[in-house]
Every structure is written in C-alpha cells, then in structure tokens.
Amino acid sequence: MSASAGPLPQTAGVPGRGRTAGQAGRGARSLGTYLPAILVFVGVIVGLELLGNLLKLQTFILPKPSAVLAALGANWSTGRFALLPSALNTLQEALLGLVIGTVVGLVVAFASARWASARGILLPLAVAANAVPIIAFAPLLNNWFGLLNPLSKALMAAVLVFFPIMANVTRGLVQVEPASLELMRSYAASEWTILRKVRIPNALPYFFTALKVATTLSLIGAIVGEYFGGSATVLGRMIVQSASALKFDVTWAAILLGAVTGIVFYLLVALAERVVIPWAAALRGDT
Amino acid sequence: MTAPNSAAAGPVVRVAGVDKTFSRGGRVVTKALEAIDLDVVRGEFISLIGPSGCGKSTLLRIVGDLTSPSAGTVTVNGKPAERARRDRDYGMVFQAPVLFDWRTVEDNVKLPLEILGWNAARRTARAREMLDLVELGEFVKHHPYQLSGGMQQRVAIARALAFEPAILLMDEPFGALDEMTRERMNDEVLRIWEQTGTTVIFVTHSIPEAVYLSSRVVVMSARPGRITKIVDVDLPRPRSEDTRESRRYFELVTEVREALRSGGADLDDAGTMAGTGSIDRAMAEGAVG
Amino acid sequence: MATATATRGGLAAAAPERATGGRRRRVLSAVLVFVAVLVVWEGLKFLGGTPWRAPLAEPGSPILWNPPFRWAFVNDLNLPHVWNIGLTFLQPWQRGADRNVAQFLFDAALFTWREAALGFVVGATVGLVLATIFVHSRLLERAFVPYVVASQTIPIIALAPMITYAFGGNIASVVVIATYLTFFPVTIAMIRGLRSLDPRALELTRSYAASRWQVYRKLRLPASLPYLFTALKIAATASVVGAIIGEGPGGIANGLGRVIITYNQYYITEPEKLWAAIIASGILGVVFYLIVRAVEVAALRGRPGAAEG
C-alpha cells in the first residue's frame, strides 16, 4: 500500500505528482502524471464550446470559452470594464495585504515561539479566529481606513493572511524533534544558535505551506473588501457590475483573470519553495 | 590523545552516589537510578547494559548533562558535568541519527564546528577527514534522506567525533539497525575508537555487542536501576570475526547474561528489542519536560 | 518515516489535532485575552477617544470624561464603547420596530446557519464521495485532483455573483456557494485519511480476501475519521463564510450577510449595530465549530487504539 499509495495531497500542496524512485525516467513519469489532467482540461474547453454551439440558451450564463476570450480581449485595458487595470489594482491590494499579514504573522510567531506564555494565549486565539468568519470585518475596515483607500482592502487581506502564517510558523519553530534540541544542548549551543541552525530551517516548510494558502487568502480578502464598496476599477466590482449589466461573457473573463492571477500567484510561491527548500519537496516524494 | 587502554591514567568520568527519581505532582513515581558509582578511565570503551527501564540511558544522559541527577555528583576531567558540556567535552550519538535534512552530509558534520567557531577552511577539511574515516567520502554532497540507516548513523558518529570531544556518549546507536549492519558498524566503531583513542560510554541492549566492543561491561538491574556487576572483558585487540567465535567470548557473553538474570532481568534475546529503548527515553523526557 | 515526512513537510495544519494543555487553562487564557482586549480598547478610548457620555446618550448630553488626546482611530465612530455595543443588542433593530437587535440577529443567524448547514452537509458529502473515488482510482485522481486544488487558488468569492445569477438569486445559490467552500477541505483531508491506514492492516485484509467495500467500510473509513473531523471543523466556518458572502449578491433579505450590508449603510449614525452584526457572525461561526467539535469528541471517544469509531 505504502508503495502504491503515491503522493498524499496536502491542503496546500500540488497533488497528483508521482513518487519517483530515482532520477531516471522522470520525464516519462511526469508526462503520465499530467496527461489525464491535461486531457480533462482540453475536454472541458471543447465540451463547453460544442455545448455553446448546440444550445444557444446555455451561452447566456455559461458563455462559450471563445466568447469569454473575445470578451477578455475586447475589455483588456479600455472601456467601462477595463479588466487589466482592475486586476492590477486588486493584485496590488492583495500583495500589500500579503506582505503586511506575513510580516506581522512572522513577528508574532517568533515572539510566541520564544515565550511559552505568549504561545498559550496566541495559539488558542488563532484557533478561535479560524472559527470566526473574519470576512465579516470587511465593512468595518472600509469604514476605518476609507472606502476608496486600497489599504482598507489590503488590511482585510492582511488579517486573513496573518493567522495561518502565525500559527504555522509558530508550530514549525516549536515542533522541533526533542533529540535535535538535545544534540544542540550537548554542544552547549546558545538559544540564538538553536534558533538559527535548527528552529528556522525546521519552520521553513511550515512557512511555505502557509504562504501558499496565504496567496489565495490575500486575493479573497482583497475581493471581499471590494464587494463592500470602494474604487470601481477592481476585479470585485467588475464582476458585480458586469453581472448586473447581464454581460456574463465579461463576468467570466474577469473571473478567468482572477483565477489566473490566483494560480500564478500560488505557483510563484510554490516555485520559490522549490528553490529555497529543495530538501522538503524531496522528502515529500515529489521530486 | 592517549592511546587506548592506558589504564594508568586517572578517571575521565567519575559518577558518585547518583540517584535519579521521576516525580509527578510532587510524588515520586519511579526510582530510575539508585546509588550509582562508576569510574571510567581515559581511553576506555565501557558499555552499560540492562533490561529496559533500568535507567542506563538516563545514566548516560546524566553523564552528558542532558538531565541532572536527583542526588550525587558527576565529575568529568575533574569538573562538574555541566561545565564539561559547556567546554564541549561530549560527543553524543543517539539511537536515531538526528541529522538535519536541510543540510548535506558534509554540512551536518560541520554543524558542531560552526558552533565552536572554526573557520570555513578548517571546517571543510575536518568534515572531509571525518567522513573519510567513516568511509562516506563519496557522499559529502548527499542529503541524509538519500542514505541508508546505517550510513546515516555513520554520519552521526563522524559528527560526534569531528571536534575531538574527550568522551563519546552513545545511546543505543545501532538499536534500529539489522543484525548484519549492526555487526559491521561494531567493527567500524572499534576501528575509529582505536584510531582516535576517545573514551566511549556505550548504552546497548545487546549482550554480544557489549562484549565484543567493550573493555568493561557494566550490568544494571531494573527498578531501581543499580549496577549489579562490572565484567572485565579481557579479549585481545584488535577484535574481529575470530573474536566472535572464540571460547572466551562465549564465556563472557554467558557471564554477562547470568549477571543480568541474577539481577532479576528478563532480557529477551539480545538485539531484538528495538522498541524498548524508547521507554527509557520517554521516562527521561518526562523528567525534562 | 511516513509521519516524520508529513510533519517535516509542514503539513501539520491538515493532520488531526492533538489536545495540548488543560481545558481549564485554555478557557482561562481565552477569558484573559477577552478581558485584556476590553481593557486596551477602553483604555485607548480613555486616553484619546471622543468625550465620554452616558451609555447610548444623545450627542447633547453632559460630558462625563474628556480624554486628554484626540486619536481618530479610537473615536466613537471607529471604536464604539463596548457597553454601547452591548446595549445596542437591546435596542429596536430599526426605528419603531418592536423586536430588538438581539432577537433580530438571532433570527438572521439562524437563517444563515440553515443555509450554511445545508451547504455543509452537501459539501461534506461531495467531498467524501470525491475522496473515495480518488483513493480508488489513480487515473481519476490524476485527472481531477489538480482542478480540485486549482479551484481553491481561485478567489471563490469572485464566483459568488455568477452563481447567484445561475441559480436565480434564491437560497439555492447561497447553499451552492457554501457547498463550494466546504467540499475542498473535506476532499483533500479524506484523500489523506482514507490512505492513512496502516499498510499492515491492509495486507491482513488481503489475506482474508476482503472485498474493496469491506476494506473501505471496516478499515479505511474508521481510520480516516480524525482527518474527517479536522476538515469538518474548517468546513463549518467556511460554510458560514460562504453563506454570508452569498447572501449579498443573492439579495437574500433574512440572513446575516444582508444585515451586515444594511447596518454598514447606517454606520455613520449607528456604528454599534454593525459591530453587533459582526459579533453575531463570529458567534455563529464559533457555535457551528463547537457543534462539530462536540460530535468529534463523541465519535472519537476511546481513540487512539480501537479502529471502530
């Protein structure tokens, strides 16, 4: 079972990768791994296109992929639904939120890893925060920082980003194998040395897992903030406005743009993870 | 470093009247060690053997100042154990290799040298030298997870010896290995010990292993952990396959086994008790945490 | 090695949680945090807030305390007094109404919870079915799991208006959104959970010539329960988020999502009401979480050890 079980998809990982025993035969294996997914993608696109041609009615809510692409081209940078500037504005809010949430999350994580009493208070708080629909705070942030201020959206993103980063990095810093700590103790290593040589490297995979989740959360935070009012040239408003104008091809084009942004954002972090901590990927078995 | 078996030198480690009790909520739960006295001579290879729960791992950890005794003293080179730890007198090898996945094999060996503040060139030279010693010179750039269990343990030994500690403390280092690998590792450890002249304290479950390796075997009994007998191993060195087949070897194995029996131990067939070491450790951790 | 790999891979978030620390201590620290927040909150207002007046007093009423500083972020608009937020629950929910805010929010929360719970059940079922399929078919797993993951890198919230139009702006659309947010954590966790079985147990059943269904029913499913509940706790909150978000564009008038939007429009005059609605959302999320947690405790009693859940 263990041999044939293959990859264990993770909350934030990229599953569906084959466990390659050695370096040889990697190319062939990965093609076999990705082929079914690629076929599904092509199949869905072709199917939607054919469906759109057969049933004219369907195109209203579910336009043909070609129509969505056409709408994307037509509304790329100008007009009432200028999609590119909207996406860039939303991305900017999300990025700002990601940076703020990550930095604050890291600072708090290091503090709570250092002081057990802080940990005793902060980790239950993080669990509680997980149970609270934080997005309900979006209108409040809009009121605090100004409806038109991108910061009000960025901070919604930051709040969503903060908790997974803080909780995961704290775990990574604290959940070090006891034997590793004993080894460092036998070297009479200082707390600072242990932090640098053991705890931080140990926390890096935890950090990247959280960061991958955080990329998505930052976009969600930004778009939710946009729903509760603000600048019109943002993806969230584009989606709502085009839908209420019954221009669903534009709506889908905007969603597509948001999806691509989200996936690219995620993949960039996944790539960074590969570069920074190659050993972690090897350990998981997705070489 | 002095040559091995130079028994004339004074004790490197002196354990005097050590007790260790584990308590929970102010109540003594286990008496792990009672009235332990032990002198370890410079360059000696000494084994601690006993049934699970006899506190042999705890004793080793007390010597290494990873936990403190409830009573009694440990003196290392004439100083308290804590001072010895701060002076980096100990090289530790645990049952698990405890290698860091994010470091290459070479960088793992360099870790203690970094902490000791050696410069980069010297670190590299020493790490290479130590890895050659454990015959892993080809694997310097590998990561630990690319090596077998036996190879990982050899890296751990190379790391423990890299900064020439006065004493090598080994806590069931080969307990997780299969019998064949274990015997090979035993020869390896003896070869290294003979080359470096380090003092070794070695905890094991395996009677053959203890006899084969040691100059003395300390037999312990359980609850409370006590030293019941110290067996002098007068087998000639260097030891080899022939040693394992010699008459004297069997006599000594029998002597240790009988000492264990009379100590009330119901030791299973030696070397098959892979899981039991964790009990010692669990108890020890209960005391620390 | 498998477990070590999993934890080192930083996947602790998805693994079943372990209870740490005593229950009493956790409750105590939660209360402590709560009190600390209130103290800091009112302390800041004491130093730099709007001049203090009697609770729920009209603007013209006498000033009881004049703070030495004026900080915008702690004025009565941005950070109302906690007692005013508390008392607003007893106010009429709108001018002239005979029901108070608490009753109104309770009804709204119940309404939203029904949507969320429906989405939660549908989403969990979908997740369970998908995971079961993926665990048994390598081909389908490879074909579809990348899209299950990709679906979550898309800001789902962006889909909400579209789903609303597709499903006619009624409760069904809200349930669909809640479902969408729920199925993912369950799918991913159950793929892991259904495979978490000890390989030796699987080999044993092979020697009994047990059928796939028997293996699934007797071994895989019980073994996956801790994973399932970890996912369900995440899904409980996610379904509430989905319901609240879905109500906005859906124009559902009876739920918390709509109440938040409405009270947001009156923020300038009555900021306390938006706070009350947000607090109600928080309580709804926590209560749903605790319900799932209680079921988990009951279902997993006696573990670890026994395979039968």
Image (tube, coloured by chain):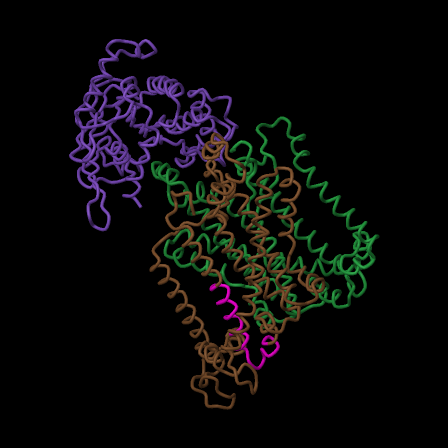
Q: Residue at x 72, y 40 (%)?
A: A39
Residue C174 vertical position relative to residue B98 in the rendered view, above or below: below
Q: Residue at x 31, y 46 (%)?
A: B289
**Residue sitting nearer the eye, A11 or B234:** A11
Residue C233 vertical position relative to residue B37 in the rendered view, above or below: below
Give how far across and how far down residue C60 sits, in percent. Answer: 51, 90
Give how far across and how far down residue B202 sits, in percent. Answer: 29, 26
What letter labels the chain drawn in brown?
C
Say if the magenta span includes residue C283: yes
Q: Is residue C289 left or right of residue B21?
A: right
Q: Which residues are magenta?
A: C263-287
Say if the magenta span includes residue C167: no
Residue A77 vertical position relative to residue A10 in the rendered view, above or below: below
- Colour given to chain A in the rendered image: green
What letter labels the chain drawn in purple?
B
Magenta: predominant secondary structure element?
helix
Give how far across and how far down residue B171 sits, in percent. Answer: 32, 30
Q: Is residue A149 left or right of residue C282?
A: right
Q: Residue at x 58, y 33 (%)?
A: A19
> For residue B95, what is the image quadrant?
top left
Q: Is residue B39 left or right of residue A274?
A: left
**Residue sitting nearer the eye, B4 or C172:** C172
> For residue B114, what is the image quadrant?
top left
